[in-house]
Image (tube, grey):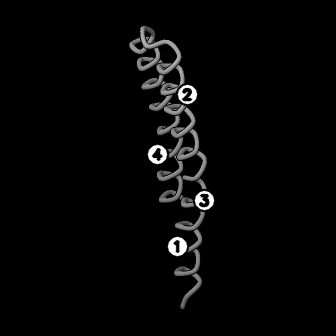
Amino acid sequence: MTPLDVAASLKVVGYGLGAIGPGIGVGLIFSSVIQGTARQPESRGMLMGTAWIGFAVVEALALFGLALAFIF
C-alpha cells in the first residue's frame, strides 16, 4: 500500500463524513414540511416551494464536498 493509496482512501472517508451533514439537513427540511402540512394543509404549496429551494442549497454543499474530494 503506497502513500497515494492511503491519501485516496482518506479522501473517500472525508467525503463520507462530510455527506452526513447534508443528509441530516435534507431530513430536517422535509420533516418540517411534513409537520407544517399536517398542521395547515392549505399551506402545502408554499412550504414545498421553500423546501425545494432549501434542498437545492443543502445538496449543493454536498456536491461541493465531492468536487473538493477530487481536487485535493
Left or right: where does residue 3 sit relative to residue 60?
A: right
Residue 64 screen position, x and y as percent: 51, 45
Q: Quadrant of the C terminus?
A: bottom right
Residue type marked 3: Leu
Front residue of 60/49: it is 49
**Circle 3 residues within 10 Å: few <14, some 14–19, many ≥20:** few
Residue 35 screen position, x and y as percent: 53, 25
**Circle 2 residues within 10 Å: few <14, some 14–19, many ≥20:** some
Residue furthest toward the left? 45
Residue named by callout 3: 17
Q: Earlier in the sequence, mark 3 or mark 1?
A: 1
* Separation (CA) of disc 4 from disc 3: 13 Å
Residue named by callout 2: 32
Foreground disc of the pair 4, 2? 2
- Which disc is residue 63 wearing? 4
* Separation (CA) of disc 3 from disc 2: 24 Å
Foreground disc of the pair 4, 3? 3
Residue type marked 2: Ser
Residue 36 screen position, x and y as percent: 53, 20
- Which disc is residue 8 wearing? 1
* Separation (CA) of disc 4 from disc 1: 18 Å
Q: Earlier in the sequence, mark 4 or mark 1?
A: 1
Up the image or down, 23 lies above or below 52; here it is: below
Residue type marked 4: Leu
Front residue of 35/66: it is 35
For residue 49, what is the image quadrant? top left
Q: Quadrant of the N terminus?
A: bottom right
Judged from the image, the secondary structure of the residue bearing numbered disc 4 is helix
Contact (CB < 8 A) between labels 3 and 2? no
* Separation (CA) of disc 1 from disc 2: 37 Å
Q: Earlier in the sequence, mark 3 or mark 2?
A: 3
